[in-house]
Image (cartoon, rainbow, N blue to C red):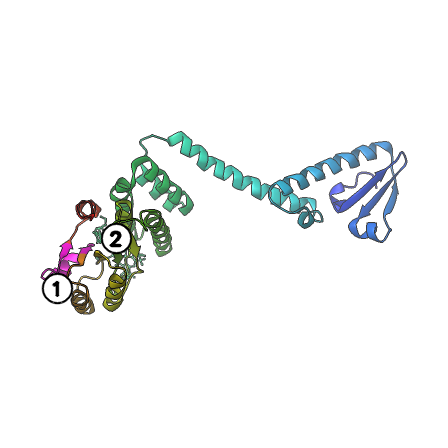
């Protein structure tokens, strides 16, 4: 018995010690009154008590991590130690991010470079944190013009050169989509400004330009609504009418020469109320100018700076 590691008896729930014996009970043996009594030298008692203190300490840390005592009391020491270590590791990581927040407040950080490094390391959570920090420090216009846009262009180039994977590009797009839509949602969604409906038309799957415009509009006081990408003309027109939208924003990125899109855009201009603005942007927008330029109030905008200028002068 001497020298046996007490990790082997980690289910002890009751321990009685006197000068010459020690009674060990597990939850089962305690219930059926079959606890083991072992003869012990006094120093073994000390050993037991030290073990017990360390186990109670583990149990306390597990409970402080959010576990219920009933769920952890029967776990082995190794299991408990792992649970506690996982939780404490997560806390440390959060503290590092929080520490960085304070350390860099008001600094002149190169967020673009840091985001690219985070993407390289597949640390998308860090990229999301950096976006939030950049927005707090520099404001949304700066983030859209000098962080999100160049980031997407760089990701596209890296993908073309085979320097990143499709998986990475998808992860980044998903995170940016989520970020931009949360900016839109926390903006003036139910305010008094005019309603702007953003989307992409049939066949257009690149939606981040539309989401950037939706986010921009929300921060400038519009009631900014967003439909998913690849939306048929009839649905865009129906929603625009239902919401009494002052403007519909379309993003057109790829491809440039889509016959279906020509006819969809023509159809859209026929279905929209004559006084609804059609705002069009995106790297392939110019290719469809011929269909749109003579129809209703249609405005081509090259970037978010131009979108801000237009929206600011059409607030009413
Ligand atoms: C993210 C991304 C994707 C994502 C899109 C995810 C999503 N949910 O949107 C996914 C992975 C789905 C994707 C797929 C594809 N993609 Co892609 N993609 C990109 C990437 C990296 C970013 C696109 C983007 O959002 N750009 C937004 C901004 C940064 O660019 P922008 O359109 O110019 O917009 C700016 C302004 O124009 C303005 N704006 C834009 N829209 C609007 C609208 C309004 C109203 C206003 C006011 C302003 C405005 O605001 C922006 C900021 O100033 C680009 C790289 C790039 N250089 O853009 C490639 C890119 C567009 N993709 C490309 C390709 C080839 C593809 C695929 C064909 C790949 C494939 N083989 O499957 C598919 C096509 C899918 C399809 N059927 O349409 C090529 C297109 C090349 C071309 N023009 O011929 C690019 C350029 C990559 C490259 N370098 O080769 N892609």
Displayed quadrant of residue 242:
bottom left
As drawn, the label of residue 97 is none
Based on the picture, tell me whether residue 289 belongs to the magenta stretch: yes
For disc 2, the marked residue is 209
* Mark 1, secondary structure of its residue: helix
**Vertical arrangement, residue 88 with respect to residue 257, above or below:** above
Task: Please say whether residue 153 is visible from this viewpoint.
Answer: no
Q: Position of residue 162 (x, y in %)?
A: 31, 53
Callout 2: 10 Å neighbours few (<14), some, many (20+)? many
Q: Are marks 2 and 1 in contact (CB under 8 Å)?
A: no
* Mark 2, secondary structure of its residue: helix
**Among the two numbered marks 2 and 1 on one chain, the one whose residue lies closer to the N terminus:** 2
What stretch of residues is rendered in magenta?
A: 279-299
Most extreme residue toward the left, as rendered? Answer: 294
Based on the picture, tell me whether residue 88 belongs to the magenta stretch: no
Task: Please say whether residue 178 is visible from this viewpoint.
Answer: yes
Q: Is residue 91 left or right of residue 63?
A: left
Q: Is residue 79 left or right of residue 15?
A: left
Q: Position of residue 165 (x, y in %)?
A: 35, 54
Callout 1: 10 Å neighbours few (<14), some, many (20+)? some
Label 2 CB-ligand 1 distance < 8 A: yes
For disc 1, the marked residue is 291
Determine the residue positioned at 89% across, 33% down: 19
Q: Nearer the viewer, residue 253 or 39?
A: 253
Determine the residue positioned at 21% across, 56% down: 247
Q: Position of residue 226 (x, y in %)?
A: 30, 56
Q: Is residue 176 left or right of residue 37?
A: left
Number of numbered callouts drawn: 2
Label 2, label 1: how far apart the Cα atoms are: 21 Å
Q: Nearer the viewer, residue 45 or 104?
A: 104
Determine the residue positioned at 52% across, 37% down: 92
Q: Position of residue 236 (x, y in %)?
A: 25, 64
């Amino acid at each position: 018995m001497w020298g046996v590691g007490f990790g082997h008896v980690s289910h002890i729930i009751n321990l009685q010690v006197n000068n010459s014996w020690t009674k060990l009970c597990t939850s089962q043996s305690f219930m059926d009154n079959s606890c083991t009594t072992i003869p012990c030298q006094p120093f073994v008692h000390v050993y037991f008590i030290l073990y017990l203190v360390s186990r109670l300490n583990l149990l306390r840390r597990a409970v402080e991590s959010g576990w219920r005592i009933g769920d952890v009391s029967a776990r082995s020491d190794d299991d408990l130690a792992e649970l506690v270590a996982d939780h404490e590791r997560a806390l440390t990581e959060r503290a590092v991010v929080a520490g960085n927040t304070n350390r860099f407040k008001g600094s002149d950080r190169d967020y673009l470079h840091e985001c690219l490094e985070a993407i390289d390391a597949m640390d998308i959570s860090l990229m999301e944190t950096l976006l939030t920090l950049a927005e707090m420090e520099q404001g949304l216009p700066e983030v859209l013009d000098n962080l999100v846009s160049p980031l997407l262009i760089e990701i596209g180039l890296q993908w073309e050169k085979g320097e990143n994977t499709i998986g990475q590009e998808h992860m980044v797009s998903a995170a940016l989509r989520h970020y931009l839509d949360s900016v839109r949602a926390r903006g003036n969604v139910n305010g008094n400004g005019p309603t702007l409906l953003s989307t992409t038309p049939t066949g257009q799957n690149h939606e981040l330009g539309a989401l950037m415009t939706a986010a921009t509009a929300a921060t400038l006081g519009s009631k900014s609504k967003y439909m998913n990408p690849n939306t048929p003309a009839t649905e865009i027109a129906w929603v625009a009418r239902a919401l009494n939208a002052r403007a519909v924003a379309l993003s057109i990125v790829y491809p440039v020469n889509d016959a279906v899109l020509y006819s969809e855009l023509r159809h859209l201009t026929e279905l929209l109320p004559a006084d609804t603005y059609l705002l069009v942007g995106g790297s392939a927008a110019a290719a469809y100018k011929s269909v749109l330029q003579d129809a209703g109030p249609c405005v081509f905008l090259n970037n978010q700076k131009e979108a801000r200028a237009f929206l600011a002068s059409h607030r009413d």
